[in-house]
């Protein structure tokens, strides 16, 4: 698992290095919450200089507890790789960011059933590939000096699928700070 994760990160960084040489507007940022769950790093670029259409790729770490209808609590942690197509509306430093993407990840899930009759909780642990589709509605401030600040909401779109990761809407709020390259 560690080798696969390391190889994925190296491939992502290699792709970023190649894409960064195309002469368009690009930036790198650190994001809290949002599609990453806890924290992540993003590379963002426009397909063509001066145009709003672009993409974002990233790598992040997530951890959290999700309570379901059953009396158990599910603890999820893992690494995610969000991919997004986005569009920036606005001509000055302040822009509206709209996007649609998919986050692919490798997650560990630990389910703990509550104590009953004096017995300790029974943990069940599993690890697997998962994904979720998300939208993005946000505000972006990108100054001429290079500073970039993003804030917004990236709600997940859930399907009835065994690999789909279900997320709570409030965890989809994000804030990001970065620099134009």
Image (spheres, rainbow, N blue to C red):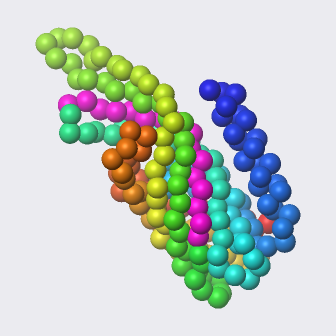
Furthest toward the left, the residue is 117
Q: Residue at x 48, y 40 (%)?
A: 130
Q: Quadrant of residue 10?
A: top right
Count of numbered marks: 0
Q: Residue at x 26, y 13 (%)?
A: 120
**Above or below, comparing residue 51 to residue 42 in the picture:** below
Examine the rendering and report whether any part of residue 29 can be seen.
no
Q: Residue at x 81, y 62 (%)?
A: 20
Image quadrant holding the N terminus, namely top right
Q: Is residue 24 magenta-colored?
A: no
**What secondary structure predominates along the stretch shown in magenta?**
strand
Classify residue 166 as left or right of residue 5. left
Q: Position of residue 129 (x, y in %)?
A: 51, 36
**Above or below, comparing residue 140 to residue 73 in the picture:** below
Examine the rendering and report whether any part of residue 94 can be seen.
yes
Furthest toward the bottom, the residue is 91
Classify residue 66 as left or right of residue 52. left
- Foreground residue among 11 and 170: 11
Classify residue 57 as left or right of residue 157. right
**Above or below, comparing residue 77 to residue 30 in the picture:** above
Which region of the structure is painted magenta?
71-86
Classify residue 12 as left or right of residue 103. right
**Above or below, comparing residue 142 to residue 18 in the picture:** below
Q: Residue at x 58, y 70 (%)?
A: 86
Q: Is residue 79 magenta-colored?
A: yes
Q: Quadrant of residue 53?
A: bottom right
- Foreground residue among 122 and 10: 10
Q: Position of residue 79 (x, y in %)?
A: 57, 39
Q: Position of residue 151 (x, y in %)?
A: 52, 67
């Amino acid at each position: 698992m560690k080798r696969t994760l390391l190889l994925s990160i190296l491939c992502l960084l290699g792709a970023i290095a190649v894409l960064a040489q195309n002469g368009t507007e690009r930036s790198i940022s650190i994001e809290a919450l949002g599609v990453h769950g806890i924290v992540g790093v993003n590379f963002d670029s426009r397909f063509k200089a001066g145009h709003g259409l672009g993409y974002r790729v990233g790598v992040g770490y997530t951890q959290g507890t999700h309570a379901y209808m059953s009396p158990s609590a599910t603890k999820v942690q893992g690494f995610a790789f969000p991919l997004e197509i986005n569009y920036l509306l606005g001509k000055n430093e302040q822009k509206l960011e709209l996007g649609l993407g998919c986050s692919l990840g490798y997650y560990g899930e630990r389910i703990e059933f509550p104590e009953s009759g004096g017995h300790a909780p029974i943990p069940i642990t599993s690890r697997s590939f998962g994904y979720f589709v998300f939208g993005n509605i946000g505000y972006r401030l990108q100054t001429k000096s290079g500073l970039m600040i993003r804030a917004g909401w990236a709600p997940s779109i859930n399907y009835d699928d065994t690999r789909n990761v279900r997320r709570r809407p409030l965890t989809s709020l994000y804030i990001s700070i970065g620099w134009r390259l």
